[in-house]
Image (cartoon, grey):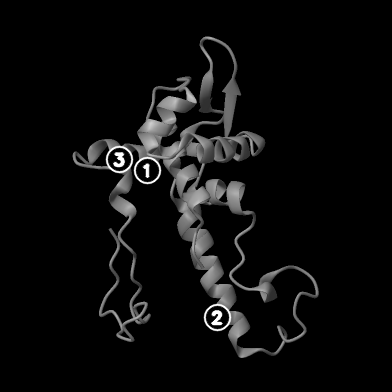
Amino acid sequence: MQITRASDYAVRVMIHLAGLPPGSTVRQSQLSQATDVSGHFLSKVLQRLVRSRLIRSQRGSGGGFALAVPAAGVSLLDVVQAIEGPVRLNQCLMEGPSCERKSWCPAHQVWAEAQAAVVNVLGAASMASLASQAKSDSGASYRSHEEPVWISGVPRKGSGKRTPRTHVR
């Protein structure tokens, strides 16, 4: 599973807006510059965030984009689901008759536990806490997450080697 660029960009936008004083409105061009996202692609991401009611848009001379809800009430999961839809690691985890093997498949429980872990981790990270962390990291940059995250015991892409420990930046 890989989060799309649209979700990544939406998270950048939400962290940026969460770090501003409450009620602040930011123009799209300023968001583009602050998050290092092209204006065209950012426009699509902003539309989805507005439709999901996580941000609001305001037209006119004082217009722009602002959080529609308090940053503490928005999780990373909320943002990802606004862009991607519900988190589903496997088709068998969907409600109803999505897979006829799910009642006896030994992998089903593993998929369910992995999905629950992803949902719990993303759901526990609020935009307020991420914005606060971004402010406290003196050299923080939105680009700091470009390095891949390796999970213990999972082969590295192309190497065939297993990584010895979890590396999270």
Residue 60 higher or lower than 20, as above or below: above
Q: Are marks 1 and 3 in contact (CB under 8 Å)?
A: yes
Residue 164 higher or lower than 36, as above or below: below
Q: Residues within 10 Å of mark 2 (few under 14, many from 20)?
A: few
Which residue is label 2 attached to?
A: 110
Q: Are marks 3 and 2 in contact (CB under 8 Å)?
A: no
**Mark found first going from the N terminus, 1 or 2:** 2
| The label number, if any, that marks residue 120 in the structure image | none
Which residue is label 1 attached to?
A: 130
Left or right of residue 18: residue 147? left
Residue 77 higher or lower than 55, as above or below: below
| The label number, if any, that marks residue 134 in the structure image | 3
x%, y% of residue 109?
Answer: 59, 81
x%, y% of residue 110?
Answer: 55, 80
Q: Quadrant of residue 147?
A: bottom left
Q: The residue under label 3 is which amino acid type?
A: Ala
Q: Secondary structure at mark 2?
A: helix
Q: Residues within 10 Å of mark 3 (few under 14, many from 20)?
A: some
Q: Is residue 49 or residue 116 the one in the foreground? A: 49
Left or right of residue 103: residue 35? left
Q: Residue furthest right?
A: 97
Q: Secondary structure at mark 1?
A: helix
Q: The residue under label 2 is which amino acid type?
A: Val
Q: Residue furthest top?
A: 61
Q: Quadrant of residue 37?
A: top left
x%, y% of residue 126?
Answer: 45, 44
Front of the two marks 3 and 2: 3
Gap in angstroms between the C-alphas marked 1 and 2: 29 Å
Q: The residue under label 1 is which amino acid type?
A: Leu
Q: Is residue 67 or residue 84 the one in the foreground? A: 84
Residue occupying the point 55% across, 67% down: 116
Residue occupying the point 51% across, 38% down: 42
